[in-house]
Image (cartoon, helix red, strand yellow):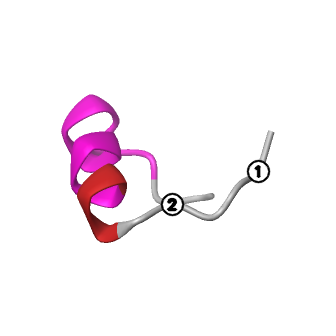
Amino acid sequence: MYWPISSYDQEYLKKMTPNDSSK
């Protein structure tokens, strides 16, 4: 799945997957 996310969602995703920078 791929969808436009806001900066708030990006920060949340970084906390969930801090090592996931391949997406």
Q: Which residue is mark 1?
A: 2
Pointer 2 residue: 5
Residue 19 within the magenta-colored segment of the rendering = yes
Q: Label 1 is placed on what type of residue?
A: Tyr
| Quarter of the rendering occupied by the C terminus | bottom right
- Work out which residue is located at the far top of the displayed protein and give it: 16
Which residues are the magenta region?
A: 10-20
Residue at 19% in and 39% down: 15
Furthest residue toward right: 1
- Where residue 10 is drawn, which disc sits there? none
Of 19 and 2, nearer the camera is: 2
Q: Secondary structure at mark 2?
A: loop
Q: Which quadrant holds residue 16?
A: top left
Q: Quadrant of the N terminus?
A: top right
Q: Where does residue 8 sit, x and y in percent of width and height?
A: 25, 58
Q: Is residue 16 above or below residue 11?
A: above
User: Where on the picture, by quarter, is residue 19?
Assistant: top left
Q: CA distance from mark 1 to mark 2?
A: 9 Å
Q: Element under label 1?
A: loop
Residue ID at (76%, 50%):
2
| Residue 10 vertical placement versus 7 (above, below) | above
